[in-house]
Image (cartoon, rainbow, N blue to C red):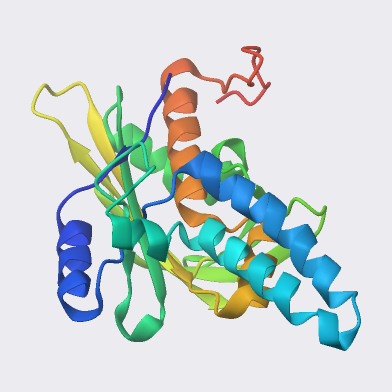
Amino acid sequence: MVSAEPIQGTSHKIIHKLKNERGTSRINVGEAERLISIAVGIPMTIFGLNREILNRPVPILLGGSLILRGVTGRSFLYQTLGVSTVEHSPATIAELPDNQGIQVKRAVTINASPEELYRYWRDFKNAPRFMVNVESVQVTGDGRSHWVAKTPMNKTVEWDAEVTQDEPGQLIAWRRTQGPFLAPNGGSVHFQPKRNGRETVVRLEIEFHQFRGPIGTMLGNVLGQIPEQVVRQDLERFKELMEAGEIATTAGQPSGRRI
């Protein structure tokens, strides 16, 4: 099975620094447990909002705390007890300064040249082929593009982006110029050849705004913003597409998305 690897280095250093300043920022709740927390927390919060005013606080607080636990992947109880249910380490998420958001870093090794991978990624119209939430990309010129992404509620999120760095065969970086709070704030993808000359390490870094409060985190999850899962899925699909020419479905059948 294709697997996108967490990255050590800069991200790990940021996390270590934040530990010294504000306590641990490492995710300690496993993926399955996070999804269960969110699945229970959302209906509990809605139930509380529909009750009489005096009976609202308890279910809203409980539901909101479960949603927050699921979206952030952090449990203060686990932190106190030194427990973690995360299967993969080290953590791939670092907090940005001044609580501005989070940065997700992941990497995958692909059996293709940096130039080939760069060319395919740089043509942003190819993004819907491997980015699971992206429906369409319209290139508007001068390094600018318009993105449309789907959500689990059959709604769309649209934003504009521009390329800020473009080094053929090595690096593409971009930032959002216009769009809603829920869209990615910016990011970069690096293409680094391995010494064997046959493979390339593709490193993807994306920044997301941090949702504040239980209502914000609930809305963020409903719109599919569990960032590390999105980044991992996109890299795994990109690897499949570039190596096999197509992306298999969960049933093992081709999805029809061919190069």
Q: Is residue 215 above or below residue 15?
A: below
Left or right relative to 56: residue 252: left
- Front-most of residues 108 and 95: 95
Point 34% across, 47% down: residue: 84
Q: Is residue 200 above or below residue 143?
A: above
Point 31% across, 52% down: residue: 92
Q: In this view, does 153 lie above or below 119?
A: below
Number of callouts: 0
Point 90% across, 76% down: residue: 51
Q: Position of residue 34 (x, y in %)?
A: 54, 49
Left or right relative to 30: residue 198: left
Q: Where is residue 181 in the image (x, y as percent from the top left)?
A: 60, 77
Left or right relative to 221: residue 176: left
Left or right relative to 197: residue 121: right
**Residue ranking furthest to the left:** 195
Q: Is residue 123 something one can see in this rendering?
A: no
Quarter that holds the C terminus: top right
